[in-house]
Amino acid sequence: MRTHFRFSAVVVAVSAFGVASAQFGQRQEQGLGLGPSVGLFIPTGSEMRNAFDSQLLTYGFGPSSADRPKERRFVSDFNVVSARRNGNKLFLFQVLQTYEIQFGDRERRIVPYARGGAGLAYYDYSITKRNGSRVSTKAGGWSATAEAGIVFNRQIALSARYNLFQRRDGISFDGWSLSATYTLLRI
């Protein structure tokens, strides 16, 4: 619990700094964007919903996808899903190569986009299934995604994403992700 509080405090502090920087016009237009994200992961598999509930709150700080430098491009992407509940634990890490298409002029204040791709995933979980058996695995596998979203002012991105994961131990890890990302700074 103490680690969760510290991480949350850091995210809030960095977010406040980023908002202040944006207000004073210090935002860079180029470079890798970094910022906080918050969202929901909604598992579609019944074993996942039973073990972790029907929706999981997700948050993090890392590379942001709000800036869109080209109309069509290949993009390396990663996604993390992590949860703990009633002795069950889950950590999924996707590394994907996606192709993105933007709709409209990049200089507009609102830029819709869509992307799809495939890649690898790392699985680390320990779950008690509905039949009472306990399964634990640390392994790699394949993964894919399809995403649609809207970018506002090249800083805020809202997206809906479907994550497809390789089945393991009879468990489907697939699910929907709804998220909001804010680009605080560029490096």
Image (spheres, helix red, strand yellow):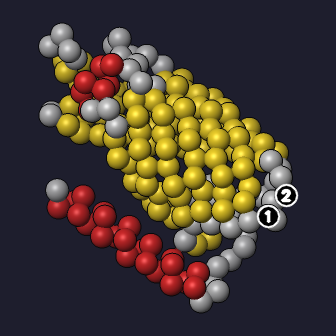
Residue 82 in view of the camera: yes
* CB contact under 8 Å: marks 1 and 2: yes
| Amino acid found under the numbered disc labelled 1 | Arg
Q: Which mark is residue 68?
A: none
Circle 2 Cα neighbour tier, 10 Å, few/some/many (<14 / 14–19 / ≥20): few
Q: Which mark is residue 108?
A: 1
Residue 12 percent coordinates (x, y): 37, 71
Q: Does 80 sit left or right of 32 as displayed?
A: left
Would you name the residue on which mark 2 appears? Answer: 105
The alpha-carbon separation of the residues under discs 1 and 2 comes to: 6 Å
Element under disc 2 = loop
> For the C terminus, which image quadrant?
bottom right
Foreground pick, 26 / 42: 42
> For the N terminus, which image quadrant?
bottom left
| Amino acid found under the numbered disc labelled 2 | Asp
Q: Residue at x 31, y 64 (%)?
A: 8
Reply above or below: 174 against 30.
above
Q: Residue at x 15, y 33 (%)?
A: 87
